[in-house]
C-alpha cells in the first residue's frame, strides 16, 4: 500500500526517458553510480501518477512528508547552509551539470 507524499530535496532533477526506468529500478543506471561515487543521495520515482513522469533527483534528500511518512521536516539554518555548499561542490566535482535547487515535489500515489 502506498499514499501520496511530498518529497523535499536539494540538488538537480532529471526527467528520465521510459527506456531508463528498468536500470533505475535496479539501481544500475550510470547516473546513480556516479552519484554514489560522489557521495550524493538519489531519489527517483513516478511523479506523474496515472500520467507517468519519472524523475531522478541527485543531491540530498531533506525529507518526505505524507500519511505514510513524516508529518513535517525541520532543518536548522546552519545545517542547510552546510549541505547546500557540500552538494554544490559534489555536483560540480561529478560534472553533473545544471544548477542545484530546492525541490518540493508532490508525488501522487500511483
Image (spheres, rainbow, N blue to C red):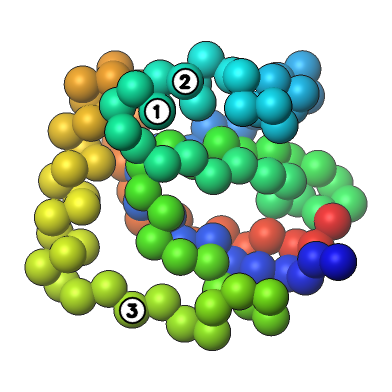
Residue 55 lies left or right of residue 4; in this view the side is left
Q: Position of residue 7 (x, y in %)?
A: 54, 61
Q: Position of residue 15 (x, y in %)?
A: 60, 32
Q: Position of residue 66 (x, y in %)?
A: 63, 76
**Residue 110 seen anywhere in this rendered image of the structure:** yes
The first of marks 2 and 3 along the sequence is 2
Residue 71, placed above or below residue 110: below
Task: Tell how many labels.
Answer: 3
Residue 96, placed above or below residue 82: above
Q: Which residue in the protein does label 2 denote?
A: 33
Q: Which residue is painted at 39% across and 61% down in the image?
A: 62
Q: Which SS class for mark 1?
A: helix
Q: Which residue in the protein does label 3 denote?
A: 74
Quadrant of image for the C terminus: bottom right
Residue 54 lies left or right of residue 18; in this view the side is left
Q: Residues within 10 Å of mark 3 (few under 14, many from 20)?
A: few
Name the image quarter holding residue 87.
Answer: top left
Q: Which residue in the protein does label 1 denote?
A: 36
Q: Position of residue 96 (x, y in %)?
A: 35, 22
Q: Which residue is painted at 71% across and 31% down in the image?
A: 25
Q: Residues within 10 Å of mark 2 (few under 14, many from 20)?
A: few
Name the image quarter holding residue 11.
Answer: top left
Q: Which residue is painted at 34% across and 22% down in the image?
A: 37
Q: Which SS class for mark 3?
A: loop
Q: CA distance from mark 2 to mark 3?
A: 29 Å
Residue 13, placed above or below residue 101: above
Name the image quarter holding residue 88.
Answer: top left
- Find out whether the residues at labels 2 and 1 contact each other: C-beta distance under 8 Å: yes
Pick the front one: 66 or 53: 66
Q: Which residue is painted at 54% across and 84% down in the image?
A: 71
Amino acid at each position: 500500500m502506498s499514499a501520496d507524499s511530498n518529497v523535499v530535496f536539494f540538488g538537480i532533477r532529471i526527467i528520465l526517458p521510459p527506456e531508463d526506468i528498468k536500470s533505475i529500478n535496479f539501481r544500475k543506471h550510470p547516473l546513480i553510480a556516479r552519484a554514489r561515487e560522489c557521495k550524493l543521495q538519489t531519489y527517483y520515482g513516478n511523479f506523474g501518477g496515472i500520467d507517468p513522469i519519472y524523475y531522478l533527483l541527485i543531491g540530498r534528500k531533506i525529507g518526505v512528508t505524507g500519511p505514510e511518512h513524516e508529518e513535517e521536516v525541520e532543518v536548522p539554518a546552519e545545517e542547510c547552509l552546510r549541505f547546500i555548499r557540500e552538494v554544490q561542490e559534489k555536483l560540480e566535482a561529478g560534472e553533473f551539470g545544471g544548477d542545484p535547487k530546492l525541490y518540493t515535489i508532490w508525488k501522487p500515489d500511483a
